Image (tube, grey):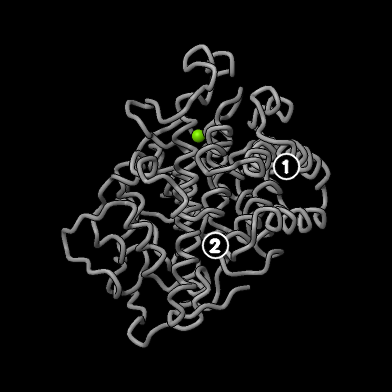
């Protein structure tokens, strides 16, 4: 576990750069893969040429559109931050439940607010939290049927009580932010599994999420890619029913170590529609990648779930290279980074006082700044590993958190 204080500015910026790199990297991979999610390699090659996709193309009516992978990843992050605040203020918290409630807010953005209302009461008010106010997130982008279906039933699954036998990649593609939580590797793995198993009950569906969360966590803490993947693998083999996921990860590692895989090579690992296949492809692409850009392009150019494999690969490589290693033109093309949101909702969401970024009523912030602000502003010592909070960074929960909101921290 890391211990960082705000006095250690260099270390703090290093952590923040890797975390933002992970999020932005995932969004870039998602957006690169979005136009070709359902295309075979033959179709991709016929449409874009022998190199396949080499940059952003139009999907969902714009260039650089992100999909459910990025949407749900951000809701994972929001849920984890709220869990952190709740744990600090209430002294008790069950993070998977708080994240589940974040996913119910995501479901609301997909046009179904029923489960959120059933969980909290209320009559159709706008849910709280800043993400529901981000225009770029209020779209249906081919959401996973298992995610939608299980959340419509409440999303009450767990590892102990699996909700179904789904091994879809909807659990792993949203798991990266679990790696931001300042915990030992084993705990990150378990939390990743628990959060994924709210909707995905097959071991491949949730163990893949635990693996990604652990690997991202190691990268955030400063490990190299090989070491990060080794730690995730070591924790994986301690879990029951790990064999299928382990075999997939090992196949991906072996392929990646042989050089940059071709679309035909990746087809040997599967289409990436399931958790262990998507993870396997991401591991192969990340290990073999000479640069961030090359790695995510390889990850989307194959027959299968291109946006999810691109997203997971982008999470890993973005955390490894940090945001400074990502082409700024690419970053600025991604959809949610150019969407303004109302500044005050930040404080509402985080339930805390803003001290490091000046926000005034009516200000609109670019979403990239919001992401950075999310990470810098809040009471996230357990997320960012900040051991000490400045005297003035006290909580002001009641005044900034309207009681009439549909979902409040009290109910989480
Ligand atoms: Mg998607």
List x then y, in percent, for residue 251.
78, 37
Please state which of residues 4 and 292 is positioned toward the viewer in this rendering. Answer: 292
- Residue identified by numbered label 1: 204
Q: Nearer the viewer, mark 1 or mark 2?
A: 2
- Mark toward the start of the polypeptide (1 vs 2): 2
Name the residue at the top extreme.
Answer: 46
Question: In this view of the protein, can residue 119 be seen by the observer?
Answer: no
Residue in view at x 54 percent, y 37 percent: 294
The dot on residue 353 is none
Residue in view at x 34 percent, y 49 percent: 132
List x then y, in percent, for residue 396.
32, 77
Left/right placement of residue 222 relative to residue 243 reads: left
Left/right placement of residue 103 relative to residue 332 reads: right
Dot 2 beta carbon under 8 Å from ligand 1:
no
List x then y, in percent, for residue 260.
65, 34
Name the residue at the bottom extreme.
Answer: 391
List x then y, in percent, for residue 303.
61, 22
Left/right placement of residue 85 relative to residue 93 reads: left
Tell me the crowding category of disc 2: few under 14, some 14 to 19, or many 20 or more residues within 10 angstroms, Cα based.
Answer: many
Q: Is residue 372 above or below residue 259?
A: below
Tell me the crowding category of disc 1: few under 14, some 14 to 19, or many 20 or more residues within 10 angstroms, Cα based.
Answer: many
**Cα–Cα span, label 1 and label 2:** 22 Å
Q: Is residue 352 above or below residue 53?
A: below
Residue in view at x 66 percent, y 57 percent: 214
Question: In this view of the protein, can residue 201 be seen by the observer?
Answer: yes
Left/right placement of residue 234 relative to residue 23 reads: right
Q: Is residue 41 above or below residue 343?
A: above
Please state which of residues 178 and 256 is positioned toward the viewer in this rendering. Answer: 256
- Residue identified by numbered label 2: 180
């Amino acid at each position: 576990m890391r211990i960082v204080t705000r006095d250690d500015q260099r270390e703090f910026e290093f952590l923040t750069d890797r975390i933002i790199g992970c999020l932005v990297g995932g969004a870039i991979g998602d957006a690169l893969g979005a136009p070709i999610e359902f295309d075979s390699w033959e179709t991709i090659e016929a449409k874009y040429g022998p190199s396949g996709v080499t940059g952003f193309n139009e999907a969902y009516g714009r260039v650089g559109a992100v999909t459910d992978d990025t949407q749900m990843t951000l809701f994972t992050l929001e849920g984890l931050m709220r869990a952190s605040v709740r744990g600090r203020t209430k002294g008790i918290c069950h993070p998977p439940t708080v994240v589940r409630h974040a996913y119910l807010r995501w479901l609301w953005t997909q046009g179904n607010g029923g489960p959120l209302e059933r969980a909290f009461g209320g009559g159709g008010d706008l849910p709280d939290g800043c993400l529901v106010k981000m225009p770029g997130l209020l779209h249906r982008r081919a959401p996973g049927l298992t995610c939608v279906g299980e959340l419509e039933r409440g999303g009450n699954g767990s590892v102990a009580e699996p909700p179904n036998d789904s091994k879809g990649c909807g659990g792993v593609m949203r798991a990266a932010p679990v790696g931001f939580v300042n915990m030992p590797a084993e705990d990150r793995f378990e939390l990743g599994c628990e959060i994924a198993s709210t909707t995905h009950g097959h071991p491949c569906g949730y163990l893949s999420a635990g693996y990604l969360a652990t690997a991202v966590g190691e990268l955030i803490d400063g490990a190299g890619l090989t070491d990060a993947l080794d730690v995730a693998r070591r924790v994986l083999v301690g879990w029951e029913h790990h064999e299928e996921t382990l075999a997939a990860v090992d196949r991906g590692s072996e392929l990646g170590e042989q050089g940059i895989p071709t679309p035909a090579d990746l087809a040997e690992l599967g289409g990436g529609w399931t958790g262990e296949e998507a993870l396997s492809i991401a591991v192969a692409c990340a290990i073999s990648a000479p640069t961030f850009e090359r790695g995510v392009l390889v990850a989307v150019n194959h027959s299968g779930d291109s946006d999810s494999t691109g997203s997971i690969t982008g999470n890993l490589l973005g955390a490894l290279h940090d945001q400074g290693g990502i082409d700024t033109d690419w970053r600025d093309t991604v959809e949610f980074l150019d969407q303004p949101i109302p500044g005050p909702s930040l404080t509402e969401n985080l339930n805390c006082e803003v001290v490091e970024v000046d926000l005034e009523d009516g200000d609109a912030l670019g979403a990239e700044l919001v992401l950075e602000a999310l990470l810098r502003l809040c009471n996230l010592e357990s997320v960012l590993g900040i051991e000490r909070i400045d005297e003035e960074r006290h909580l002001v929960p009641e005044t900034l958190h309207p009681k009439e909101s549909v979902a409040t921290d009290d109910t989480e």
